[in-house]
Structures are given as C-alpha cells and as structure tokens.
Amino acid sequence: MSEIPETASGGVVWQSSPPGSIYDYIRVASFSIGPDGLVEQWSRRAVDLFGVTAEEARGKDPVEAFMPADLRERGHRRVKEILDGKEWTGLVPFRMPGEDRPRGIAEMYVMPSETQTGERAALCIVVDVRALRRIETDLAASQAIFGQSPFGFLLFGTDLTVKRANRRFATVFGGEADDHRGRTVHDYLGRAEADRMTAALRKVLETGESVTDFQIVGAAPGAKDRRHWSINLYRVHSGSGRPIGVAGLGIDVTRRHNAAREAASARRNLALLNEAGSRIGNSLDLEATARELLDITVPGFCDLASVDLYQGLLTGDEAPPGRWGNSHDVGYGAGSAELRRVAFASAVSDTPLRTDEGHGPGSGCCGPVPIEVGAVHRYPFNSPCAGVLRTGRIRTVLGSDGDLVQSTLVVPMTAHDTVVGLVQFSRAKGSEPFGERDRALAVELAARAAVCIDNARLYRREHERALILQRSLLPPGDPEAAGLDIACRYLPGTTATEVGGDWFDVIELPGHRTALVIGDVMGRGLRAAVAMGELRTAVRTLAQLDLEPAEVLSHLDEIARGLGAPIGAQQSRTHKNRGPELSEVYLATCVYAVYDPVTRRCTFANAGHLPPVLVEPGEEAMLLDVPPGMPLGVGGEPFEEVEVELPEGALLALYTDGLVESRDHPLDEGLQAFRRALTDPVRPLEDVCDRVLTSLNTGHGEDDIALLMARIQGLPSEAVGDWQLPREPRSVGRARELARAQLAAWDLEPLLDTVELLVSELVTNALRYGEGEIRLRLLRDRTLVCEVWDSGLVQPRRRRARDTDEGGRGLQLVGLLSASWGSRRTPRGKTVWFELALPDGEGTAEPTVEQLLSMF
C-alpha cells in the first residue's frame, strides 16, 4: 500500500501500491513451517527469490533443501528453538536445490505461530541482502549527489512544485532546504523568466527530452545584481519507468557570461579596428573618410553617430601651428569655431543628432535644434562638445528623459596634436551602456579617422598647389601661330589621383616658325609638377636660342639629369653623419617639333614619347616614324631628327599617354581608337578635339590628358619675298629697292622708311662681317619679318659705341626701331632678323630724341 487517502466523510479508501514501489526493490518473500519442521506455504516472492516452485518446496525440510551442508546442524537447532516459541533474526546463506555452493545470503525474520489445533509453527520473512545493499548504496549515492552537490539542485513533482531542494540552492535563495518544498518557479523568478522555465519543465515532463544549458536571468532575493544561470532539466522515472517528476541542476554562470561578453566585446573591438584600418582613408577625401568611419561603427559599435569638422579645415584655411587643441588660443582649438556636419548615420532613426546646448548631466549633446548634414554651426562655449574640443579629452554625456539617446561618447578627432573635428557615438535606450573598453575603442577609431582626414587635408593642399602650378605653366587661352590652326585640350586626373607632369606648349620662333612641344614627367604630385615647370621653362629658353630640335632635347636631357644630381656638399656638411644623398630622379618624355610655314616642313625630335599622328587630306591617320630615343634624364644617347613635309590641310596631333592608355584597354587599342577618331579632319579643329575626347575613354581619371592639334595652312607665296644678292656694295641699294617694292605691293607704305633703313643696316653688316652670298627674305603674316642670310658663322653682337666712333650703332638702331630682333645659326651660316608690327596692329612706338641721341 503506497498510501491510504481519506474520503470527504473521513473514511479510508484502500488503494493498491503502484508498480515500482519500494517493495519491488526490497523483494520480500515469505513461507511458513509446520509443527513438523517442514514447509507448509510458499509465496510467489519465494519462488522468485529461490527459484523453486511451491510444489517443489512444500513438504520439504528447509534446512536440508536450502542450506549448505556445513550449516545444517546449526540450522536444525534454530528451527527447533523457533518451534519452541523463540523468535530469531539473522543472516542465512542459501543455495538452490541441486547446487553445492551458496548462491546468496538472505536476511531472515522468523516469528513463532500456532496452527488451528494449537500446535506450534513458524512464519519466515526473507529479504535478499544484495537488494538491501543496493538500495542502501543507491540512497547514499543519491544523498551525496543531491545533498553535497556544489550546484543548486531541485526536484519538481508532476505538479511542477518543488519536492526537494538541496543545501546549495537554499544558500543562494535563503532559508533551509525544507522551506522550499511546495514552491514554484514563480517564487524565484520574474514573470517572463518564470513562464519560460515553466514551459521548459512541462515540455521535459511530457516528452522526456532533456534540456541542457537553459539560460535564465534573475536576481536572488534581497540582491540587486542580475545573475545568469544555466539550467539542465531531465525527467525522473520510477523503477517501472513511470515519470515521477523533473530534476533540475542550476549552475551560476554569471562570471562566465560576463567573461564571454567581455571576450565578445574584445573580439568585436578588434574586428572594428581591423576593419577601420582597411576601410578608413582609402579615398583621400575628407567627407568620404568621415562617412567611412560611420559605416564601420553604425550599428556595430553604436546606434547613432555624427562627425563635425572645422569649417576652416574644409575650406582650406591655414591655421597657425599649434593652434588646434590649444585651450588658450581663440580659433579652431577654442571649441566655439565654426564646424560643418559632414556625416551622420543611424540604425534606429533618421533624425539627425541635435546641437549641444547644456553642459550638465542629462543635458547631453542633443538640444532641441537638429543639425543637418552639410550645415555649418557652432557649439556654445560652455557646452560639453565645446569643452571636448578645447581640452582634447573624451567625455560621456547622458541622454535626457524622453530622449531616444541613452548616452553619448563625445570624442575629439586628434591628429598630430591637432584637433580637426568632433565625432559623437550614441547608443539608444535599451542598448548596453558604454564601458571603459568602449571609450578606449572610440578614442582609437576617432584618432585613426583624424589621421586620415589630416592626410587628406594635406593631400588636398598639395594637390591644389600642384594644380595651380601646373595650370599656370600651360599656355593661356588658344595659342596662335603663323601657318597653323591650333587647338588644344587638357584634362586633369580626378581628385583621387595626384597631379601629373603633362604639359604642352606653342612657342613662336623667328621667321614665323613655330615650335610645338608636348611632354610628360614620370611620377605624380607636386614634385612632378615642379619638374614639369622647370623643363617647360628650359624648353622656352632653349627655343629662343633657335637651336635644332635634337640639340634642344640634348640640353633638356642634361637639365633633367641635373634635377636628380647629388644634393651637394653643403647639405652633406649639415648632416655630418650621412654621406651625399640623391634627390628624386626625374625622367620625362618629350616631342619637340619646329614648323616652317614657308616651306611647310616640320622637323621632329623625340625623347621616349609616343609618336605624333599625321592625317593627310583624304588619307587615314598614321603614326609618324620618328625615332623614339631615350627619355630625358637617362643620358648617354644622342637624339635623331626627322624632317617631314606636311601637305596643305594636313592634321598633326601630339598627345600624352593618358589619352590612349588606361587599365581598361592596352596601348595598341587606344592608339587605334585615336587614329579612327581622326579619320574626318575636314571639320573645324575644335570639333575634331571634342570628337576625340568623346569617342575615347577619357573619363578614367587615372592620368592627366594633354592633346595638341595643328592644321597645316602654310604661308601663301604672295606673302613671301625672297631674293639672292651678290656680295658687292651695290647690293645694299638693291636690297632697299626690293624691300620698298615688296612693301608697296603689300600696301605697307607706313613701314617703308623704317624697313628701308633697317634692311640697309643688316645688308651692310653682312657685307662687312659675313661671307658668301647674301639672301634677303620678307615674310608677311600677323607681323612683318625681315631676314638677312649669309654664310658667316660670327654672330652679330650689339655694343655701345664711343663718342668718337664713326660706326657701331647699326644694331642699336635696329633694336630701337623694331619690335624685336635677333640672330640664329643655320646649317650654312647665320640669319639676322628683325620684326615689325603691321600698321593695323598695335604698332611700335617711335624712338624718342633722347633714345636716338644716346647712340652717339
């Protein structure tokens, strides 16, 4: 009988014990002995214990049947004493019939009894000692596990109430272990967690599926800190397999949870720093760098964030050294200067972070006025944000009641002891508060972004300076040249690329000739722009000397090598411990061409540059076969010249590699596309330039693009006067006559006297100091040019005549009356020339009396 419940009327209801009761474990058997000492009754439990049926046992002497031979004598005495009315309890070894060796030990309880006739008999109760020992061992083990466990242990009944709690559980939740009987999980946990726990208990009880590491959060009675427990639940069964409840083992994993959270936070922070190192600062753009910072931190680190940079930083204003971050100065570092909001990001709301108005706890950096991206604003002097800008120290500001923000980290963006702006990281209410590790990470992220922003600022400044330098060295407006229609284009690379060293130039030479130059300094940045400027200036200087193209490139090569020469002894002495150092080696490519509009012949020399392209009327574009030579700065190799006669209406194109080469296509494909774009040169030259730029891939922005195009026109024969004069004194008068007649034919009578006088001086000098025949040539284009050729190699030199000298004033007179004059070497001698403005031009001022008298 497991229990005897009472009815409502107080009566007793008999109830059978359920299977798996304690009696099933103990295995109690019984039998009776009659007055004759033989077995009279044999229970079914005895059948199970001894393995002998009732038919086999009845009528037998139990001592002879079940006891070993060496114990039978003692056994008979005990039976006799029992039949005499004495009780006995003891351990008795027993065997199975037919076996010699003992099979087990039975604990036997023998009680005297009487038959109906009054004869003495005995009732024997037998228990298998092995079963008792197993029960004792199981009980001891259960008590040890349940009572001595260092973890909280609960046993819930089928009604989900606590049936038993161990001492460890009572230590945590108070009271004695027995005080917790009859309680439910709602007595220990909040409603939400208790409901989760109840559902888990019910599921385990119904399905028998165990639950491991079931996480619940709560606080022990009287404690404020929240604890984390890991619960393991499993269903408990009786011996017959009937569910009798659920066992729960609870482990306090608060430390483990905190350690895991700290580890996860550390991993997250390391991942953020790693991502920041790879993603921030790739664009070299201030605003883009700020956006990259927020892309990394929202929502991985915070819920809302914004970046403010000083307005002066964005507009390119230069602050005095040490002003940023100095709390004693007024300016960028004073905290109240103008800032521009350059970036904002939010994972919870599209509302911008609002401006800082207060400075006490709860006021936050979020006042009533939102700041839009791009807005220029100031923080009040006493506000937390202004204080952070002045001190350069991070500050945590709590959000106000009713605000979306729980707390904000206000972090200065400091690079090289310079505060460039401010970043605010905010977490919304419900998010985990910022910790010390978060503060350190915020400072590191802001510092990395600040360094990238400062680098972008420095790059922007250098880029703008190089751009200004580069633009200032390019020909202004549309260049003009005699016998040429010229158009040009220059496309800088994108702001993400540095300034290149591309340049082109159109230089007017004596005799209405024109030098066309295009070049590219290898490398990028301010150094390349400076080197380009030096080379361009050198080209113009050499061009005025009227040297041959190959000579010009040879001199440029020496200049380029000089740019990369050792720094020198003076700087070496400054650094005594260091030897002479080499500055950056400058290499450049260049094409130098000289065009003569009278002969329509062009002489080319190339220093490692792409070949010019020529398009003759009605023909396809072709690359001129000009020996490329070595780039400038390499040295050691002479340059070759190629002279090409250009037909009237032909198109000549000089260009840099940025036009025909990019990552998207190789050089050969670019050259083919360029030649196809020039197949229709009849259109106006400006339209041809536009067609080239629109048809080719010129938007890659990888390199600067320079394009110089010229359409050949040539001087008409009626604009040229050319005569050979014999080497005799009368040629002076003949030269005056020819010049007068030619000027009259050109309707240039206002220039007759001046030209007649100057031609007479030049021909006289050729007769006196020159050699061979004399050649006189007059060229009329935008100006009038007069040239006198002879075979002598001695160049004329202007000198100041003494008062007693009868001559020596001719070249002074030429210099006073002409717009310009000079001399140049030719393959067979020299040429002395002067130039006059046409009467419909600005003209040349007549010399004053003082200037004329100064010659005497």
Image (spheres, rainbow, N blue to C red):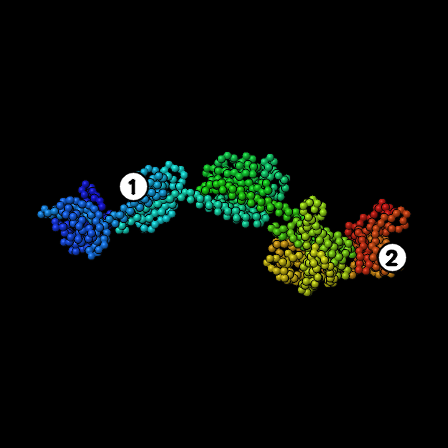
Q: Residues within 10 Å of mark 2 (few under 14, many from 20)?
A: some
Q: Measured along the vertical axis of the image, is residue 199 above or below residue 385?
A: below
**Looking at the image, which is closer to me, 601 or 75?**
75
Residue 834 picture location, percent across and down = 81, 54
Q: Amino acid at mark 1?
A: Gly
Between discs 1 and 2, the one toward the N terminus: 1
Look at label 2 and name its amino acid: Leu
Residue at 19% x, 41% y: name it.
Answer: 10
Residue 337 shows up from this direction = no
Mark 1 sits on what residue?
182
Image position of 323 with respect to 677: above or below: above
Question: Residue 235 in the image: x percent, y percent?
Answer: 31, 48
Mark count: 2
**Left of 461 or right of it: where is 70?**
left
In the image, taking residue 378 as reference, residue 637 lies left or right, namely right
Res 679 → quadrant: bottom right
| Visible residue check, residue 586 | yes
